[in-house]
């Protein structure tokens, strides 16, 4: 089955800095790559996604890049703000299922 | 759209009791997923339905867990009998196609 790894597991940045989280997957059949944000006590929320025919997608301060050859995709957050503090999950899609990574806890210090 | 609705939001019960969690998916979504989240195991897919039919229940931990979807707007996850190790947050998610999933607010279950 699909093996998903996220790095780093925790990330602390100063407000205004950039943050990058990387997700590695094992199954080359995966074809949809979303990132979810989960604030404390809240539900996971889809923040950005990319499909396998696209290399990069941007939405304001967040972007996702995909390298299908190397089987990894990354979340980029620029100009971080305290409200970006949360746990972020990658979840490559394969055969009707999202396989969630173990999460990255991002802390943005003012 | 109200989004995915789950009830109850919090449930505290005693070991051995039956627990029923409820979910109303987003109207028009054909897929419904039940997840469990714990610190130790992260987000686990328990079971999912397509057009009200269970497709994959390989994530259901044991026979004490069962799920039904009697119609397109309602699903239940039942635990009978409940045990302390079932304490977790249970999420329901729905999607039009299986990939882009939207989560409900979750039910925090505590089994004493």
Image (cartoon, rainbow, N blue to C red):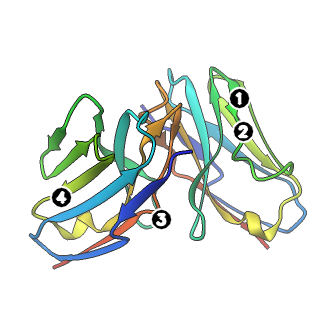
Distance from Cα at disc 3 to Cα at disc 2: 26 Å
Number of numbered discs overlaid on the protein picture:
4
Q: Quadrant of the N terminus of chain A?
A: top right
Query: Is residue B44 rendered to the left or right of residue B55?
Result: left
Residue at label 3? A41
Residue beneath the point at 18% across and 51% down: A62
Dot 4 and dot 1 residues touching (CB under 8 Å):
no
Crowd band around label 3 with a 10 angstrom C-alpha radius: few (<14), some (14–19), many (20+) = few
Check the residue under mark 1 and report the chain it is in: B
Residue beneath the point at 24% across and 44% down: A67
The answer to whether A47 is drawn above or below residue A97 in the figure is below
Label annotation for residue A89: none
Dot 1 and dot 2 residues touching (CB under 8 Å):
yes
Crowd band around label 1 with a 10 angstrom C-alpha radius: few (<14), some (14–19), many (20+) = some
Dot 3 and dot 4 residues touching (CB under 8 Å):
no
Distance from Cα at disc 1 to Cα at disc 2: 7 Å
Residue at label 1? B54
Residue at label 4? A77
Check the residue under mark 3 and report the chain it is in: A
- Quick one: SS at disc 1? strand
Instruction: Specify the farthest residue to the front.
Output: A69
- Quick one: SS at disc 3? loop
Are the residues flagged by discs 4 and 1 from a single subunit? no
Distance from Cα at disc 3 to Cα at disc 1: 29 Å
The percent coordinates of residue A38 (x first, y second) are 40, 59
Nearer the N terminus, badge 3 or badge 4?
A: 3
Q: Nearer the viewer, residue A17 or B23?
A: A17
Q: Nearer the viewer, residue A8 or B89?
A: A8
Crowd band around label 4 with a 10 angstrom C-alpha radius: few (<14), some (14–19), many (20+) = many
Residue at label 2? B57
């Amino acid at each position: 089955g699909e093996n998903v790894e996220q790095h780093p597991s925790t990330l602390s940045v100063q407000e205004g800095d950039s943050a990058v989280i990387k997700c590695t997957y094992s199954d080359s059949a995966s074809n949809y790559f979303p990132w979810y944000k989960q604030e404390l006590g809240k539900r996971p929320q889809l923040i950005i996604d990319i499909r396998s025919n696209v290399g990069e997608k941007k939405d304001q301060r967040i972007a996702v890049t995909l390298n299908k050859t190397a089987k990894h995709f990354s979340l980029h957050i620029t100009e971080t703000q305290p409200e970006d503090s949360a746990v972020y999950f990658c979840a490559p899609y394969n055969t009707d299922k999202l396989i969630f990574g173990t999460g990255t806890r991002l802390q943005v210090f003012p | 759209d109200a989004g995915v609705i789950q009830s109850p939001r919090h449930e505290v019960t005693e070991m051995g009791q039956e627990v029923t969690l409820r979910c109303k998916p987003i109207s028009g979504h054909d897929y419904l997923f039940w997840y469990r989240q714990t610190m130790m195991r992260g987000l686990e897919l328990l079971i999912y339905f397509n057009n009200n039919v269970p497709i994959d229940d390989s994530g259901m931990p044991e026979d004490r867990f069962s799920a039904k979807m009697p119609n397109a707007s309602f699903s239940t996850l039942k635990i009978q009998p409940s045990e302390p190790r079932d304490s977790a947050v249970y999420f329901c998610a729905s999607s039009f196609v299986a990939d882009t999933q939207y989560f409900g607010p979750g039910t925090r279950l505590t089994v004493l």
